[in-house]
């Protein structure tokens, strides 16, 4: 019995160490939409965005994607600028990262989101902003989106960013995206009208940990399950 207890204590120590293992941040180019910098373009907005692939329904003027200076003093903005995305389905920011989906790891993308100050330019329900992970070419094959989370405008502020996330569960060997380049997307899904303000895009990779309860969280529930097995 003493030997079993010692084993459980040792395994518990390993479990807690793994649970506290720091996740790795994956670099997102122009993550806070600081480039390029608008100067005197009214209203301090420029339609080209560096390092992001822009899908824009306005093929002539590219009026649905861009960056703008934080002239309305939106709180907790990273840097001095934000991205702007027209609310109509088909508008999006896409980026292939310099990392690939690793078997055994899980991933989270977090984006700061707010609404324009002017109600006229705010997207209305059922318009939603979709945050997605993808692989390959999602433009030609929408099935290449491997995880998506949507956010409606009802819970958003106009004077501060709110963080929203999409989570990709642990990558399995049989997943089509295993080993593929990580792609991230910020997509509009609604009717024409309104804009989303976005900023501070972050992607985090979580290493493989002993998650015995298959709930994507390592905590004392995993230890309890392990201890029950050992004491059976």
Image: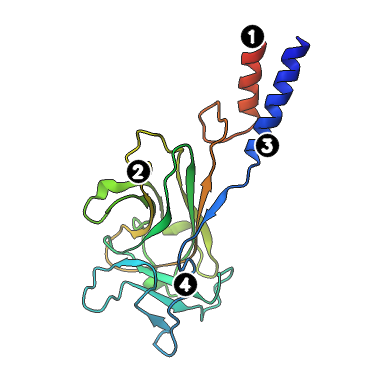
Q: Quadrant of the rendered structure where residue 152 is?
A: bottom left
Image side of residue 56 versus residue 156, left or right? left
Q: Are marks 1 and 3 in contact (CB under 8 Å)?
A: no
Seen in the picture, residue 155 relative to 218 is either above or below; the reply is below
In primary-sequence order, the first of circles 4 and 1 is: 4
Residue 30: x and y in percent read: 46, 69
Q: Are marks 2 and 4 in contact (CB under 8 Å)?
A: no
Q: Nearer the viewer, mark 2 or mark 1?
A: 2
In primary-sequence order, the first of circles 4 and 3 is: 3
Looking at the rendering, in which quadrant would you find the C terminus? top right
Q: Which residue is mark 4?
A: 82
Name the residue rendered at 54%, 73% in the picture.
Answer: 74
Looking at the rendering, in which quadrant would you find the N terminus? top right
In primary-sequence order, the first of circles 2 and 1 is: 2
Q: Which residue is mark 2?
A: 177
What is the CA distance from the residue labelled 2 to the residue labelled 1? 39 Å
What is the CA distance from the residue labelled 1 to the residue labelled 3? 25 Å
Residue 202: x and y in percent read: 51, 58
In primary-sequence order, the first of circles 1 and 3 is: 3
What is the CA distance from the residue labelled 4 to the residue labelled 3? 38 Å
What is the CA distance from the residue labelled 3 to the residue labelled 2? 29 Å
What is the CA distance from the residue labelled 4 to the residue labelled 1? 56 Å
Residue 139: x and y in percent read: 25, 56
Image side of residue 61 versus residue 220, left or right? left
Residue 55: x and y in percent read: 28, 65
Q: Which residue is mark 1?
A: 232
Q: Nearer the viewer, mark 2 or mark 4?
A: 2
In primary-sequence order, the first of circles 3 and 2 is: 3
Name the residue rendered at 68%, 34% in the picture.
Answer: 16
Q: Which residue is mark 3?
A: 17
Q: Nearer the viewer, mark 1 or mark 3?
A: 3
What is the CA distance from the residue labelled 2 to the residue labelled 4? 30 Å
């Amino acid at each position: 019995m003493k030997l079993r207890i010692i084993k459980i204590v040792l395994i518990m120590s390993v479990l807690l160490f793994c649970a506290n293992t720091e996740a790795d941040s994956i670099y997102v180019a122009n993550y806070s939409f600081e480039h390029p910098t608008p100067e005197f373009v009214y209203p301090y907005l420029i339609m080209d965005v560096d390092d992001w692939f822009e899908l824009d329904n306005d093929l002539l003027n590219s009026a649905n994607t861009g960056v703008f200076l934080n002239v309305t003093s939106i709180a907790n903005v990273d840097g001095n600028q934000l991205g702007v995305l027209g609310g109509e389905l088909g508008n999006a920011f896409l980026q292939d990262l310099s990392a690939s989906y690793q078997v055994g790891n899980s991933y989270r993308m977090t984006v700061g989101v707010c609404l324009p100050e002017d109600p006229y330019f705010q997207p209305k329900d059922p318009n939603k902003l979709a945050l997605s992970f993808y692989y390959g070419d999602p433009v030609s094959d929408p099935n290449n989106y491997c995880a998506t989370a949507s956010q409606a405008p009802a819970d958003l502020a106009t004077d501060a960013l709110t963080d929203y996330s999409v989570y990709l569960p642990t990558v399995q060997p049989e997943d089509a995206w295993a080993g593929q380049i990580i792609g991230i997307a910020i997509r509009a899904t609604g009717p024409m009208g309104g804009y989303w303000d976005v900023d501070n895009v972050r992607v985090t990779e979580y290493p493989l940990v002993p998650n015995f309860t298959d709930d994507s969280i390592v905590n004392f529930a995993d230890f309890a399950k392990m201890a029950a097995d050992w004491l059976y």
